[in-house]
Structure formats: structure tokens, C-alpha cells
Image (spheres, grey):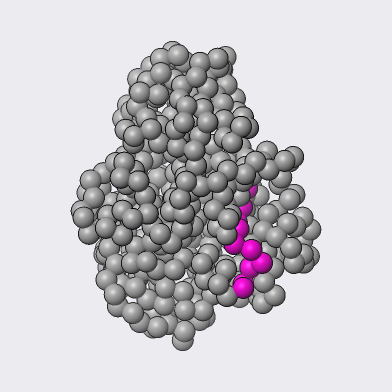
Amino acid sequence: MAQTSTLVSTQLTLTSESLPLFSTATQTVLATPSVVSTVAQNSSGEPVTIPIVFNTNFDTNPDGIIRQVDFLRQRYISPEPASFVSNLVSAISSVFVKAPPPVPISNTADAQYFGVVQLGTPPQSFKVLFDTGSANLWVPSTRCTDAPCMNHARYDFTRSSTFTPNNSPFAIQYGLGSVTGVISSDTLQFAGINIPNQQFAEAVTEPGNTFLTSSFDGVLGLGFTAISINNIPTPMDNMIARGLIPAGIFGFFLTRGGVSGSSLTLGGIDTTHVNGAITWIPVVRKAYWEVVMDSVTLGKTTLATGSHAVFDSGTSLIAIPTVHANQIHQQLGAIPFTNGLQLIPCSGLPPITFALNGVAFTLRNEDYVLPFGFGYCVSVFVGLDMNNFWILGDSFLKFYYTIFDVDNGRIGIANSK
């Protein structure tokens, strides 16, 4: 059964500062998931902040949590045809192949943050998942008549005076099926930033019900170009190359509990949400946002050392090796629920600490559970066999201000405010 959605809109803010660090806003334009006919221009290469929308139904909807687990399994460990993997092998280790880019299974939008961008002239608006775990932009096309396409905003090239055909084929594998389409070019607008001739994929087929009830229309990848299908330059690449932002950097501020105010800042760091020092961690390679993790400790028990962590804003739960998931849930007195989920007490549990570049980042008991009932909560930890990789999704990211430095190949983490 399709789930209803509750959306919280935030404000889009343009800053007057020319430096990547900024804290004051001089112009505010209300942006909602509905169609926006005009946007503020950003011709001076200033940092901008774009709204992030959160579907508040996820935290209290067990069905949404279950579908998110299914999404994680298909996203990270489903077998991939060689044609889809060949573009990725040179960029990532042989033990970690993830199906790019992410799109939720059924109603997994209940678990994710997304925002609005525009394509074409005049602009056509789309709700997209801003995803650090992939590197392609795609939206449904009017040339698609499958039910999932018809249920979402669709790009109509005939309505755009800046459309340029490419017609190269595009295909993304998702577990039991694939999204197929063609590559096109058009003007992409992020808030006040205009990116002419941005290549993207028009989805022409979306078989089955995989995307039928998702709350967003498409995906905008924020990973490195090395994992881009067809080696298409990412929107970040184009903004950097054309001097549309002052630095190749972006930052996420994610609110909790459905509270409005979440944002994605492009070209700088919004210091109004940074509390204290920033810890910088170099990425293993410029592909996924992957770093070496010193250790993970639950209470006084060390669970892992020398593991790798992937920062993935397109995933909501925390996916970890099954052996460690079993350790955590055994220590927490978990009760098996369904589909790999575990029920644990909602209170009285030890903190879990992730040590990154010598700095401890701790989630308290209430931070790693989701409400369920009868004094029990659902654990956000999901066991997936991924060869010692820990996928840190929004259940981790929303407790910190997270900075992704494309230019220098590093991730910054700070306490948020």
C-alpha cells in the first residue's frame, strides 16, 4: 500500500560573501517542491544554499524502514552485469562494487532528504535526491509512459529552447530491473546557479513498481566523476570548471525529527551551522566519499579497527558488516524483527563511537534508534556483507555538519548547531 508523505520545506539563501566560509544572508527566496517559474541569479560565483526537504513519515513508519533495508541490499550487494560495472572498476577496490546511482525501492523516500532543481528554458522543476553515493543526474522523461514516470514530474525537451540532443544510451541496474534512457543536455539551475549544457539522463523506461511511490522524481549525484556512468561530468565538475562557485566544496546540514531548516551549501561552508573545530579526513581515492576509519566502539567494546567508511547521503540507515551487526545487537539485547531489522530497548543503551582521524564522533542511545512501540525501537544498524565497509548514511550525517571537499579530496566533520 502506498504511504502518504509529509513534506517540510525550507528556505533557499544566497549570501553576499565571496569567500567559501559565510554566515550572513542578504537575499532569501522561498522555494518549495512545487514548480518554480523564476529563480535568483548567481553570476558572481558566490556560495549558495539550496533547500533540503525531509519526508517526516519515515521515523514512525516500520514499512518505510523495511523498504529502506531492501534498498540497501540491492544498492550495495546485488549482482551487476559487466556492462554496468566496467565504468567503475578502475575507480574502486575490487571488494566494493556498488550499483550507481541510488534510487529508492518503492517508498524508501520516507527515509531520505531531497531538494528542488530546474532543467530547461523556461525551467522545469524536479525533486531530486542529493546523493554523495553516486555521480549522475537523471529525471523521468515525457517519452516514458511507465506508471512510475507518469506518477512524477517528467522532463519535456519540446518545452525547452536550450535542449540539445545527445541520444547516447544510458542504463542503470537496480537489483531486479533497470532504468534506461538517453543522454541529453540542457541548462541546469541550482537555486541561482545556471549551468548551461549540463548532460543528464532522461529516463525512458522505469519498469515495475520500484519507483512508483517515491517522493522524489530523480537523483543528482555528488560523487566523483570516476564513478559516473558514461563518464559524464557531474554538476559539481561543471560549476567548478566554469567558476560558478568560489570553491569545489559543498556542505550538508540535516535537521532531525522532521524539523525544517535542512540545507545543502554549494561552493562554501555555512558557518552558522558549524559548532567548533572541523576534523578533516582524506578520501581513500576520488571515487566514492570513502575514508579510513580508526575504530568503532560500542560502550567499552571495540568492534572494528582499520575499516573503511563511506559517507552516503542517499542512504538513511547505517549498513555494516554482518559480523559487527551481530555483535552490536547481541550486546544490546536485540529481538529479531523482520527483513534483517532488530528491535532494541529505546533507552539505557551505551553510546557508539566512530574514531576518524583521531577524533571521536559519538552517537548516543537515542541517536541510533527509530521509534517502534511498547518500549522498543528499531536499530539503524543493518548487517550487509561488504568486506569491512561501513556505510554511514543520514542516521549518522544528521548529527554533524558534513563538508565534502572535491578540490582537495577530503571530508570535513564538525558538530552542528
Q: Nearer the viewer, residue 217 or 274?
A: 274
Is 333 situated left or right of 279 in this image? left
For the point 38% across and 32% down, the residue is 388
Is 162 situated left or right of 261 in this image? left
Report whether residue 232 is seen. yes
Q: Which residues are magenta?
A: 243-255
SS majority, magenta: loop
Residue 256, x across and y down, in percent: 60, 39
Give above or below for 278 relative to 216: above
Question: Toward which corner of the image does residue 259 lie, by quadrant?
Answer: top right
Report whether residue 110 is seen. no
Whether 258 is among the magenta residues is: no
Residue 293, x across and y down, in percent: 51, 34
Give above or below for 171 relative to 198: above
Residue 299, x across and y down, in percent: 55, 17
Whether 251 is among the magenta residues is: yes
Residue 106, x across and y down, in percent: 34, 47
Is 52 situated left or right of 128 in this image? right
Q: Nearer the viewer, residue 411 or 44?
A: 411
Question: Toward which corner of the image does residue 68 lie, by quadrant?
Answer: top left
For the point 63% across and 57% down, the residue is 265
For the point 68% across and 43% down, the residue is 278
For the point 61% across and 32% down, the residue is 358
Give above or below for 338 relative to 199: above
Q: How many marks?
A: 0
- Which quarter of the rendered picture does the N terminus lie within? top left
- Which quarter of the rendered picture does the C terminus lie within? top right
